[in-house]
Amino acid sequence: MSNKEIIIKLREQTGAGIMDIKEALEQAGNDESKAVELLRKRGQKMSAKRAERVAGEGFIGSYVHSNGKVGAMVKLQCETDFVGRNEDFRELAKDLAMHVTATNPTYIKSDEIPENVIAKEKEIYSEEIKKQGKPEAMMEKIISGKLEKFYEEVCLLNQAFIKDDSKTIQDLINEATAKIGEKIEITEFIRFQI
């Protein structure tokens, strides 16, 4: 594959600018997977810079499964009406609605989980670990790992994207933020099932 073809492939995959891709490839010694990792990290940094901005515009993406018995709506917000009307942005909102339909998350992010729910999970994990006879010294590390797994099940942003399980929903949002150049956030979702 020529260098030009690799750049085009990475642009489609990450949404990053051509100069950023060239720089990432150079830093990664032309290793595509390392370049993608570098671009994702840069996307996260860009997302962090945009975190203080207000996302007052957006689009509500919806999805209803072909059986007509389950569906979801996701409120995806951005900073400007221009981006809210962007086809890529709207497609992202629809993909997120499909993802919510398939995975049925409970929360958007882990800091929304009530303390009593986390405390109850920790209590359950602690009992499991004691029954397995694991050393007390390992308990905190095991509980931490189990909580991370719990967050992946119940928190939308922590879940692996159903169309590409190498990315989390947070990665998807970060990539869209880097590509579009505005703060993007999921502010609400609802799932219906008969």
Image (tube, grey):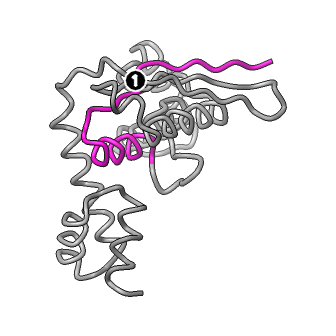
Residue 189, horizontal then vertical, whole percent: 52, 20
Question: Pointer 1: residues within 10 angstroms few (<14), some, or many (20+)?
Answer: many
Q: Name the residue under label 1.
A: 58
Q: Please say if 34 is above or below 12.
A: below
- Membership of 181 in magenta stretch: yes
Which quarter of the figure is the C terminus placed in?
top right
* Kind of residue sitting beneath label 1: Gly
Question: Image point 30% across, 55% down: which residue?
Answer: 40
Res. 47 image quadrant: top left
- Membership of 140 in magenta stretch: no
Residue 148, horizontal then vertical, whole percent: 43, 39
Magenta segment range?
Answer: 168-194
Question: Image point 35% across, 33% down: which residue?
Answer: 83
Q: Nearer the viewer, residue 134 or 188?
A: 188
Q: Disc 1 on helix, strand or loop?
A: strand
Question: Image point 21% across, 53% down: which residue?
Answer: 42
